[in-house]
């Protein structure tokens, strides 16, 4: 990853300038040099020297179309700030290879000082797909001027917080380890998504486990996954599962809760029925969710 490669080249003064731009970006996309100087509390000479350096490293974008020059962070700079903080907090010490690429995120493996391996999910919403634009509206409401930086930060916070709530139930959901800005670190299951298996052992058992867990999460935490299916369930060789990708969760008192819950359940039932001939009575399962 680009940011991880650059991190060792940066001095703390460079990072402070990046953070000053980040603060300024709460008010406007491009931040004027005077404001960068103000937020960093450096002298003008130091500010200009650092801006020049990080601009050459391709971490900031310059806008010279107005009468005052402004700078904005690019996504590599934002990755850098988040990674730097995660390292400072001793949550992460090394980044591993890319393990998954979603429509709105890149997921890497990473390691802490004790050689525990985690999944590190970096949100990348807000520029491409229709779905991500829709999702970002769900997050920011009508405040549509808000930047990609803010949207992705909100997404990470939202996923981290829901992971904390469901992790208490002791089921097969990722353990939240930490988050910063647009990055969430969580426990990692070395496997692949259900959809990529040609066949699995004990499909009945796995099906039942998934349904049972969704039921507990619904009944005890009032949480509905919202995007459940063969793409968001990781399975390993030993038959362990991990139900991932909780960003689009909704509470059980959401106006569309019934239809979204039923869609989640149907997705799982249909997939196991078609691929593994696991017979189930979808209506009966749905009914059992509503019985407390
Ligand atoms: N905790 C984890 N353990 C193992 N693999 C993971 C974990 N989290 C994510 N992955 C891998 O990364 C991929 C993408 O992660 P995730 O599904 O959370 O986000 P997303 O795919 O960007 O969202 P969307 O499905 O809406 O595109 C997963 O399909 C999976 O391969
Ligand atoms: Mg996914």
Image (cartoon, rainbow, N blue to C red):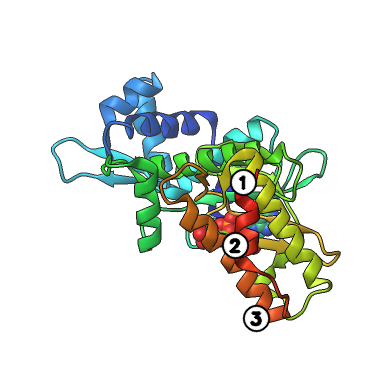
Residue at the far right in the pictured view = 238
Question: In percent of the image, x 35 and y 55: which residue is there?
Answer: 133
Residue at far left of view: 67
Q: Secondary structure under badge 2? A: helix
The mark nearer the N terminus, 1 or 3, is 1
Q: Is residue 289 above or below residue 193?
A: above
Q: Secondary structure at mark 3?
A: helix
Near mark 1 (Cα within 10 A), the count class, few <14, some 14-19 or many ≥20, is: many
- Which quadrant of the figure contains the N terminus? bottom right
Q: Is residue 237 above or below residue 116?
A: below
- Name the residue beneath numbered marker 3: 274
Q: Nearer the viewer, residue 11 or 146?
A: 146
User: Can you tell me whether the CB of the residue at mark 3 lies under 8 Å from the nearest atom of ligand 2?
Assistant: no
Q: CA distance from mark 1 to mark 3?
A: 25 Å
Quadrant assignment for ligand 1: bottom right
Which residue appears at 48% of the width and 50% of the height? 257
């Amino acid at each position: 990853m680009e940011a991880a490669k650059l991190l060792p080249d940066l001095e703390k003064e460079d990072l402070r300038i990046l953070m000053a731009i980040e603060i300024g970006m709460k008010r406007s996309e491009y931040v004027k040099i005077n404001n960068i100087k103000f937020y960093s509390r450096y002298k003008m000479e130091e500010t200009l020297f650092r801006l020049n350096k990080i601009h050459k490293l391709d971490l900031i974008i310059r806008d010279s179309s107005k009468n005052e020059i402004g700078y904005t962070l690019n996504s590599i700079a934002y990755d850098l700030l988040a990674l730097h903080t995660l390292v400072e907090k001793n949550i992460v010490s090394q980044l591993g290879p890319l393990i998954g690429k979603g429509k709105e995120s890149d997921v890497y493996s990473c390691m802490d000082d004790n050689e525990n391996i985690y999944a590190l999910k970096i949100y990348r919403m807000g520029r491409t797909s229709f779905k991500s634009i829709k999702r970002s509206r769900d997050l920011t409401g009508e405040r549509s001027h808000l930047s990609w930086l803010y949207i992705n930060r909100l997404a990470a916070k939202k996923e981290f917080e829901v992971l904390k709530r469901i992790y208490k139930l002791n089921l097969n959901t990722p353990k939240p380890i930490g988050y910063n800005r647009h990055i969430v670190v969580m426990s990692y299951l070395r496997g692949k998504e259900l959809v990529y298996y040609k066949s699995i052992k004990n499909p009945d058992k796995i099906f039942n486990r998934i349904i049972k867990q969704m039921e507990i999460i619904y009944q005890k935490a009032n949480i509905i996954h919202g995007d459940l299916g063969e793409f968001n369930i990781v399975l390993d060789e030993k038959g362990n599962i991990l139900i991932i990708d909780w960003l689009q969760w909704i509470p059980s008192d959401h106006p569309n809760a019934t239809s979204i819950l039923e869609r989640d359940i149907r997705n799982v039932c249909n997939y196991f029925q078609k691929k593994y001939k696991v017979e189930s009575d979808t209506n009966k399962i749905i009914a059992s969710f509503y019985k407390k």
